[in-house]
Image (tube, helix red, strand yellow):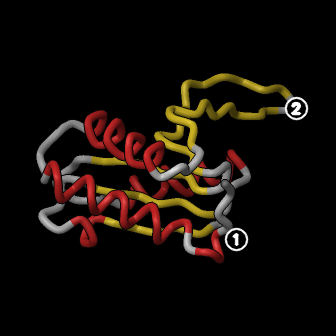
Amino acid sequence: MTLAYDSGLTERLIGLAIEVHRQLGPGLLESAYEECLCFELKQNGIAYIRQATLPVVYKDIRLECGYRIDILVESEVVVEIKSVERLMPIHEAQVLTYLRLSGHKIGLLMNFNSVVLKDGLRRLVLG
């Protein structure tokens, strides 16, 4: 099943993330939220790749530099999960860099350490 951005993929992802946050609350490690969000994606039939490698192309050479997208959903949306006191500009820059390097246009930055998850969500669009 492929959900186009226009059909509400990011809205669906946000809904699933809110469900994870309702169940777990703030204060856990990023890896716990990532695992639970992937569980929800699988339960809902949404394709994803967890810890998708992201090479850097330098002078036409593909270099593995250790960059990893937390979750790439439907080969379309880059999801970066955080569990920090507050989101900083560097976190948004990280997602924008992943979008630029991967060629994807839409990213979601999710800070699960927020009391209310919607306060820790950022939707970023490259282009």
* Residue lying at 51% horizontally and 32% vertically, measured from the top left: 51
Quadrant, the N terminus: bottom right
Q: Secondary structure at mark 1?
A: loop
State the residue in front, 120 or 48: 48
* Residue lying at 47% horizontally and 43% vertically, measured from the top left: 42
* Residue lying at 11% horizontally and 45% vertically, measured from the top left: 27
Which mark is on residue 127?
A: 1
Q: Is residue 87 left or right of residue 75?
A: left
Label 2 environment density (alpha carbons within 10 Å; few <14, some 14–19, many ≥20): few
Most extreme residue toward the bottom, as rendered? 6
Count of numbered circles on the image: 2
Residue 104: image quadrant is: bottom right
The residue under label 2 is: 60
Most extreme residue toward the right, as rendered? 60
Q: x and y percent of residue 68 in the render?
A: 53, 33
Q: Amino acid at mark 2?
A: Asp
Quadrant, the C terminus: bottom right
Q: Secondary structure at mark 2?
A: loop
Q: Is residue 86 left or right of residue 43?
A: left
Which mark is on residue 24?
A: none
State the residue in front, 18 or 119: 18
Q: Nearer the viewer, mark 2 or mark 1?
A: 1
State how far apart marks 2 and 1 are (Cα). Answer: 23 Å
State the residue in front, 73 or 98: 73
Label 1 environment density (alpha carbons within 10 Å; few <14, some 14–19, many ≥20): few
Q: Is residue 111 left or right of residue 126?
A: left
Q: x and y percent of residue 112 in the render?
A: 24, 54
Q: Amino acid at mark 1?
A: Gly
Q: x and y percent of residue 26 in the render?
A: 13, 52
Q: Earlier in the sequence, mark 2 or mark 1?
A: 2
Vertical placement of residue 111 versus 70, above or below: below
* Residue lying at 33% horizontally and 57% vertically, measured from the top left: 17
